[in-house]
Amino acid sequence: MKVVPGQLLGTEEEVMPGANAVLEGSDIVASAVGEAEVKNKVVTVRAQGIPVMVKPGDIVVGRVEAVFEPVALVNLGLDRTKDGRQVTLPGYAVLHASHVRSGFVKNVHDEVKIGDILKARVEEIKREDVGLTIKEKGLGVIIAFCTNCRTKMERRGPDFYCGVCDRVEKRKTAEID
Ligand SMILES: [Zn+2]
């Protein structure tokens, strides 16, 4: 399906946002012109046109792909910048323990888990490396998956709840600075 930025791709109940797809409320919308496809419940948009690199200050949405203490590797989708540009990025961005929340974070893994969807801000770019931060209110894990059964968890107050396992897990969420 050919889509344009802002076009509805589904709801977060149905699919997860992959490359060039972002959450707006509970809707997932395209953030690039291209071909939308759903694979394994992840919707992506194969963008047409020349990708634009991110720059410091950009708000991005990404998925935690791996944790190698003290960093998490985040696969960035694509989002609108403050001035409305589309941005995209190959490879992984890096979230270091020092950019997770205020106070000392010993293990990134205590705050974000593999598979989680994060809203983050580009903190710095050094050579090819893109550094992210979620260390402020409004940024953090927006979708979490149970570490026991991988079910998408519900928000319950400040935490996430798995109805299958009846367990509560903590994350660094938008309410935490
Ligand atoms: Zn579970």
Image: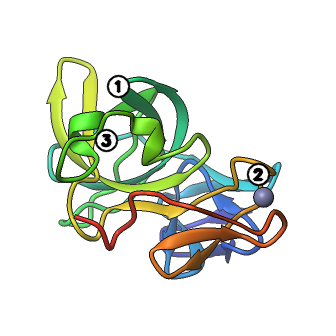
Q: State the colouring used for the structure image.
A: rainbow
* Rendering coords of residue 101 (x, y %): 24, 52
Residue at 65%, 70% (x, y): give it: 161
At horizontal 39% and vertical 65% (from top left) the residue drawn is 173
Residue labelled with disc 1: 70
Residue 140, quarter of the rendered image:
bottom left
**In this view, 66 is above or below 139:** above
Q: Which mark is residue 131?
A: none
Location of residue 168 in the rendering, given as x and y in whole percent from the top left corner: 63, 65
Badge 1 amino acid: Pro
Between 17 and 68, which is closer to the camera in this rendering?
68
User: In the rendered image, which quarter is residue 35 located in?
Assistant: bottom right
Secondary structure, mark 1, is loop
* The one of 106 and 82 positioned closer to us in this rendering: 106
Horizontally, is 159 left or right of 37 in the view?
Answer: left
Q: On the image, numbered disc 3 is attached to which residue?
A: 52
The image quadrant of residue 120 is bottom left
Type of the residue with mark 3: Val
Q: Are marks 2 and 3 in contact (CB under 8 Å)?
A: no
Lower sequence index among marks 2 and 1: 1
Q: CA distance from mark 3 to mark 1?
A: 28 Å
Q: Nearer the viewer, mark 3 or mark 1?
A: 1
Residue behind mark 2? 150
Q: Quadrant of the N terminus?
A: bottom right
Ligand 1 within 8 Å of the CB at mark 2: yes
**Which of pointers 2 and 3 lies earlier in the amino acid sequence?**
3
Q: Is mark 1 within 8 Å of ligand 1?
A: no
Circle 1 crowding by C-alpha within 10 Å: few under 14, some 14–19, many from 20: some
